[in-house]
Amino acid sequence: MERLIDNATIPWGQTAKRVDIDQKIDQVWKCIRDAFLNLLDDTAAPAKCIQPPKLDEIAGGTADWLPSNTLTKFNKTLRTCCDEIVQRITSGTLESPANASQPTLLVRLDQYRCGGSGASCPYAVHEP
């Protein structure tokens, strides 16, 4: 996530007028929000690296947490996704994902980490 922000051409600059500054701040935070929503979209490429059958096996206690080859593939896919998001920021084509209100990849991983629904999991993020 840090790499995404470091490499993106996010318009951090300042302008002279207060109204312009407020608009610029809103644009910067929208850009960052959209970038993270795209990266953590539960239907995007990084999430597809970790298929539900493997997570079900992990949640059922029949396997260790993600094996190193899966984590390596996941990391490479996250980097590729970050690079694509940076390109879309640079070209001005980055948009919010269509399902931005859905749980993110992190919420789903927390649920599996806690063995299913995550209802009693201290790590789970509970959506309102």
Image (cartoon, rainbow, N blue to C red):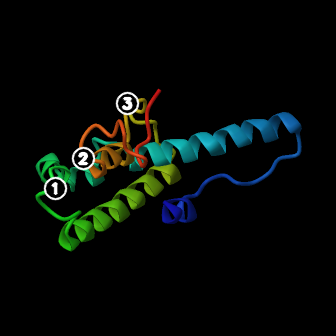
**Residues under numbered marks 1 and 2 in contact, where contact means CB atoms less than 8 Å apart:** yes
Rendered location of residue 76, percent (x, y) = 30, 67
Residue type at mark 1?
A: Gly
Q: What is the CA distance from the residue labelled 1 to the residue labelled 2?
A: 8 Å
Q: Nearer the viewer, residue 58 or 23?
A: 58
**How far apart are labels 3 and 2 at the CA level?**
28 Å
Task: Provide the secondary structure element on which disc 3 rests.
Answer: loop
In the image, which disc is placed on residue 98?
3
Give the foreground label among 3 and 2.
2
Q: Quick check: 70 left or right of 53? A: right
Name the residue that disc number 2 marks: 115
User: In terms of sequence position, does the residue under pointer 3 or pointer 2 come before the other?
Assistant: 3
* Three-letter residue code for mark 3: Ala
User: Residue flagged by tag 2: what amino acid is it?
Assistant: Gly
* Tag 3 near tag 2, CB within 8 Å: no
Q: Earlier in the sequence, mark 3 or mark 1?
A: 1
Query: In front: 89, or 67?
Result: 67
Note whether 128 is above or below 67 in the view shown: above
State how far apart marks 3 and 1 are (Cα).
34 Å
For image coordinates 43% across by 53% down, the residue present is 85
Q: Which residue is mark 1?
A: 61
96 to 87, vertically: above or below = above
